[in-house]
Amino acid sequence: MKYLHLIWRSLLRSRRRTLLTVLSLGVSVFLVATLQSILGTLDGFAHNPDSANRMVVRHKTSITNVLPFRYGDWLRQQPEVEAVMGLQWFGGIYQDQRNFFANFAVEPEYLVPMFKEEVRGVTEAQVRDFVRDRTGCVVGQALADKFGWKLGTVVPLQGTIFPFTPRLTIRAIFRGKRTADEMALYFPYKHLEESIPRMKGKVGTFWVRVRSADDVPRLIERIDHHFSDALEPTYSETENAFQLEFLKMLGDYATMIHTITAAVLAAILIVTASTMAMTIRERTTEIAVFRAMGFTGRQVLGLLMAEGVLLSAMGGLAGIGLALVTAGAVRGNIGTSIPWLSDFQLQPATLLFCLQATLAVGVLSTFIPAYQAVRRPIVEGLRSL
Amino acid sequence: MTTWLLFLPLIPALGWLAWAALRHAVPLSYNWRSLWQRKVATLSTAAAIAVVVAIFVVVRSLSQGISHAFVSSGRSDQAVVLRANARVELNSTLERDQVRVLKADPLLARDASGVLASAECYVIMMLDYADGTGGTNVAVRGLEPAGIRMRDRVRLVQGRWFNPGLWEMVVPARMAWRFQGLRLGQSISFAGHRWPIVGVFDAEGSAFDSELWTGVEQLMQARKRDAYSTMLVRLADPDRLPGFIRQVDADKRLKLEAKAETDYYGEQTEAGKPIQVLGNLITAILTLGAIFAAMNTMYSAVAGRTAEIGTLRALGFRRVEILASFQWEALMLCSMGGLAGALLAQGFNGIQTSTVNFQTFSDVSFAFTITPGLMAQGVAFSILMGLAGGFLPAWRASRIPVTEAMNS
């Protein structure tokens, strides 16, 4: 510890170099922290502990095929099942295509029991209003805030999949754990069914809430077996698997992010190593003087290594700080083009990883030049004095 | 195109540098040799720049590949007719009598086999990946025979076209190896039938490279639909296209809308937006990092050569010439990295990948295409880094007082 001042002074000796190295490390670490957190945020959607009890039943052929509504009655009779809700992706547009948000037609009476964790903070009176009003709807707080909606506002949704433009009155506004959950609108299924003849008695998916998560695998098997010979066979999976399927559609984003992370780490290793090599080479004489004064080789090595680690740690912390400061901006900008990222959050594990990685970069990049400098005979170092 | 605008400031700067080099300035070989004096620093900086340039080129090729898939799909004398407000084929429905009305339009082109209009059915289905890691939604298009003739970029590479009356499919070569059961002679099970794969086509990277093709009537029958999705029409006179579109939009009987095929696919390039946004962010940040690294190296090059700079000044070289000389050195350093990075990126050329079109929830397959143009962009980009990273150190070098420099 008593050498900390010495290490600090040697870093300050070439302020510009230290600053440039810290900045170059900082932006790279910032990038790694942000990218890895994007990955972590996306993964969070496919590993949502709240949805362990829920599963999704859909048509085996594809997500756009519809199932007979009566399948819901059979599902409700299963002993493990707590609640079943028919849900149809409506894909309506509010005013402009860019105002994209998720909107679904659902069986209103089951909405709150099904999404207990995601749809919260609505009073019983509001739920009653919603269930009674066939042209009513429920929206999330974040969505209501975005467009300045209040209870009673009428929201026209222009159908894209269905040639029909419902005008929906907001009957309840809910809060959810995540912003992405709040960016949704639900309206009564009956309204859709009555307006679109081909949807009569048909629905896209059933969401099933199971009493105990342990029963889910067996229930999935039983449902699919039961309907395997039907005209409309089903495909059931857990809600997490269903989400993962959509995430996987984004492309192999995980491989891309990991590749970039590896490349960036390699690049900063090279950059730091080159900086430290420059620093140490300039100090050949000084190192010789230190050793002539009685510092052991190991001590000098330790001092140089500490300097390298301190330098890279500063870069790492600068990057993490930058990531923390800009997290809100990332949420706002990328969140609009990739809906899942409206919940973008820096993951503590990722930040820890970044810190560890920069420390490792510090150690790895300094060791070789420092070791070489220490191995050099003192006399040779003093010769240039 | 817009990317090239970014490189516009390069032109005057490079022009000035070339002029400085030609005007009996400090010889360039001096800079080249100086770079190799400090091998480790030079190589490591160049390597870092190479990584950044490689990422830049690969990410750009990714977003270009996606846009290319859509932009190259349309023809300017063809129009897609959809249900009003449907936006994409998947959402659209078209009744048989509407199709009859449209096909009778005198503006449409004809060839030996009849009118060039194809009523089509567009659906999606689940297919399993060949490597057994799950599956994804892929698009299936049912066409009339005219539909094949109207897409002249699509050509058969293996087997034969489907027979419109049979349960047969033709698949793009790019998808054949990515999914189970899509090779020639294999078959897939879909909508209660087995569909043998009778042919493989290539669509030159357009959107059709992500679609399975079959006869429209077979597909509708299998999916128990009695309505088509959309219709593709070709006009006899390309100039009449806006008129045709207005006419369809205004026809109250039809309640349909028509879009130029090029516009229709142009709108779908949105599919590449997430990757584009992410790519731009990544490149911007990394560039900043690389510029700092280049600056660092150049500053230490300047610091280590104070005496040399003093000598140059004493020999009569002017400040501007020294500025130009060091700027050249930075350019050499960075463009070396840029060239290496562009070559590195070349290794990605041809790798197949895919993303999803969120408007149709279906798979879009495309290949990384590292074109010479993209590689040139990468190198231009590294030159930009060299200019930005080299200027301050070069400025500093030119400002060192002669006496002080000679003293050290």
Image (cartoon, rainbow, N blue to C red):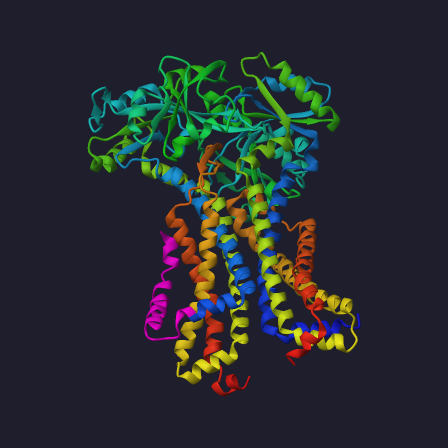
Q: How many marks?
A: 0
Q: Is residue A238 left or right of residue B8?
A: right
Magenta residues: mostly which secondary structure? helix
Residue, x 65% and y 38% (percent of image)?
A118
Q: Is residue B115 left or right of residue A308?
A: left
Residue, x 70% and y 54% (percent of image)?
A356
Can residue B141 be found in the magenta stretch?
Answer: no
Screen quadrant of the C terminus of chain B: bottom right
- Point out residue A346 in the picture as x, y percentages from the top left corner: 64, 51
Inspect this view and state whether residue B198 appears: yes
Q: Nearer the viewer, residue A320 or B102?
A: A320
Q: Nearer the viewer, residue B306 or A379?
A: A379
Residue, x 33% and y 20% (percent of image)?
B144
Can residue B8 be found in the magenta stretch?
Answer: yes
Q: Looking at the picture, does residue B333 appear above or below residue A252?
A: below
| Quadrant hosting residue B266 | top left
- Tell which residue pokes out farthest to the bottom in this image: B403
Inspect this view and state whether residue A9 appears: no
Residue, x 57% and y 67% (percent of image)?
A20
- Point out residue A158 in the picture as x, y percentages from the top left corner: 44, 36
| Quadrant hosting residue B87 | top left
| Quadrant hosting residue B220 | top left
- Point out residue A208 in the picture as x, y percentages from the top left corner: 65, 26
Span highlighted in magenta in the image: B1-29
- Point out residue A59 in the picture as x, y percentages from the top left corner: 55, 22
Q: Looking at the picture, does residue B203 appear above or below residue A141?
A: above
